[in-house]
Amino acid sequence: MSSALLDAPTAAAAAPSVPTTVPAAAPAAPAAPKLANPGPLGLAAFALTTFVLSMFNSGLVSNAALSAVVLPLALFYGGLAQFVAGLFEFRRGNTFATTAFLSYGAFWMSFAAYVKFVVPGLPAADAHLATGLYLIAWFVFTLYMTVAAMKLDLAHKVVFVSLSLTFLFLALGDLAESTGLAHTGGFLGLLCAAAAWYTSFGVLTNETWGRKVIPLG
């Protein structure tokens, strides 16, 4: 018998083992940074500028030369600051606040430009018609924003109802050249400013304290 057969291995060599590895779990994505609520800023910017303008519209401040103080406020605080608040509301996904703050921020900037650059070139006899048309257009916008605001708390409802009436009476005052209607619009503007300030104060205080301190209705 051949010795070669005696020398052959009796079993096949074991196949080399393949190491098994479990892939490590992917690291969790970092949480998105919390965005501050821009609502109190937007409301405060709107309230302060509305208050100053309404002091003149109501006749409580009768020196028209002093009304120039409104323009820088309208441009930078009521306009730019409120517009920025609207951009951050867009980032937060708040459709109503985005529409409101961007629109009224643009309103104040357009108002500053209108008074500074447009009004001086208008025919004196017809300037009131242009202003009345401008205000009527904003009344229409504010009216449907008021309908949407009926879903919100009482404080926001008061802001938008009083703002609608403010635009309406100011527009009628210009179109009819009625000082009485214009002054009524001014007093309604003061009410609107107070409501917007209160709402800003309430939202800011409640968020800062982390609980309901100021009732908003």
Image: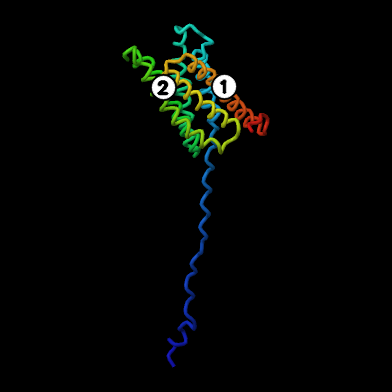
Task: Give percent across and percent down for residue 194.
Answer: 58, 22
How crowded pointer 1 is (Cα within 10 Å; few <14, some 14-19, many 20+) is rated as: many
Of tags 1 and 2, the one toward the viewer is 1
The residue drawn where x is 57% and y is 36% is 152
Q: Nearer the viewer, residue 147 or 24?
A: 147
The residue drawn where x is 43% and y is 27% is 138
Q: Nearer the viewer, residue 205 or 6?
A: 205
How crowded pointer 2 is (Cα within 10 Å; few <14, some 14-19, many 20+) is rated as: many
In the depicted structure, whether residue 32 falls above or below residue 128: below
Q: Considering the image in quadrants, where does the N terminus appear?
A: bottom left
In the displayed structure, does residue 155 sit left or right of residue 106? right
Q: Which residue is mark 1?
A: 191
In the displayed structure, does residue 192 sit left or right of residue 120? right
**Amino acid at the residue labelled 2:** Met
Task: Give percent across and percent down for residue 64.
Answer: 45, 8
Q: Nearer the viewer, residue 173 or 204?
A: 173
Q: Which residue is mark 2?
A: 109
The residue drawn where x is 36% and y is 20% is 130
The residue drawn where x is 50% and y is 27% is 164
